[in-house]
Amino acid sequence: MLRQARREDIPAIHRVRMSVRENRLVSRVITDADILEAIEVLGRGWVVESQGEIVAFAIGNATDGNIWALFVEPEYERRGYGRQLHDTMVAWLWSQGLGSLWLTTDPGTRAQRFYEAAGWKRTDTTQRGEARLELHRQTVE
């Protein structure tokens, strides 16, 4: 079941985030306050529950169009949860009046291929070596 993320979901969001095999957090710590601000002030988050447990989440920033996070627990991959979260988040961000979205991810990963399959285009490489991808509203209409 997909639903909007709530503050009480933050521990499960951390758990899912730390369970992933790719794009692991190494350079900084994401705090509860960071997630709360991301889902209540700067944008919105969504979670997918399976048998009452959160197994995937996504967070989009409505102020700058950044896809802040989209992660699925490894044992729940390839069930369509990532695409469901992606499509819900992108539709909501478009409804907020944004004309383009952006994200960064490690290059050559399944995540990069996932986004490219959804219409995203690689536009740059960050100073940290991450791939920057963008999605423009007209590419999905």
Image (tube, rainbow, N blue to C red):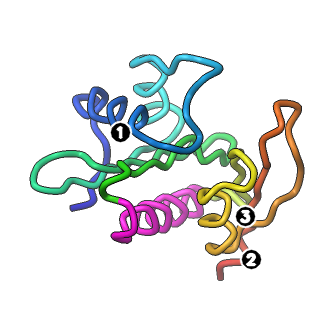
Earlier-in-chain disc, 3 versus 1: 1
Earlier-in-chain disc, 2 versus 1: 1
* Span colored in magenta: 77-96
Displayed quadrant of residue 40: top left
Query: How packed is label 2: few (under 14 Cα within 10 Å), some, or many (20 or more)?
Result: few
Q: Residue at x 48, y 31 (%)?
A: 41
Real-space CA distance between mark 3 and mark 1, rounded to the nearest whole angstrom: 25 Å
Judged from this view, the residue extending furthest toward the left is 51
Q: Residue 111 location in percent, x, y?
A: 60, 56
Q: Amino acid at mark 3?
A: Leu
Q: Is residue 33 above or below residue 126?
A: above
Query: How packed is label 1: few (under 14 Cα within 10 Å), some, or many (20 or more)?
Result: some
Real-space CA distance between mark 2 and mark 1, rounded to the nearest whole angstrom: 32 Å
Q: Nearer the viewer, residue 100 or 51?
A: 51
Q: Secondary structure at mark 1?
A: helix
Query: How packed is label 3: few (under 14 Cα within 10 Å), some, or many (20 or more)?
Result: many
Q: Nearer the viewer, mark 3 or mark 1?
A: 1
Q: Secondary structure at mark 3?
A: strand
Q: Which numbered dot is residue 138?
A: 2
Q: Which residue is mark 1?
A: 16
Q: Residue at x 33, y 70 (%)?
A: 79
Q: Is residue 65 above or below residue 78?
A: above
Main secondary structure found in the magenta portion: helix
Q: Residue at x 40, y 26 (%)?
A: 36
Could you tell whether 127 is left or right of 20 in the image?
A: right
Real-space CA distance between mark 3 and mark 2, rounded to the nearest whole angstrom: 9 Å
Could you tell whether 74 is left or right of 68 in the image?
A: left
Q: Which numbered dot is residue 130?
A: none
Q: Residue 16 location in percent, x, y?
A: 35, 39
Q: Which residue is mark 3?
A: 135
Q: Nearer the viewer, residue 7 or 28?
A: 28
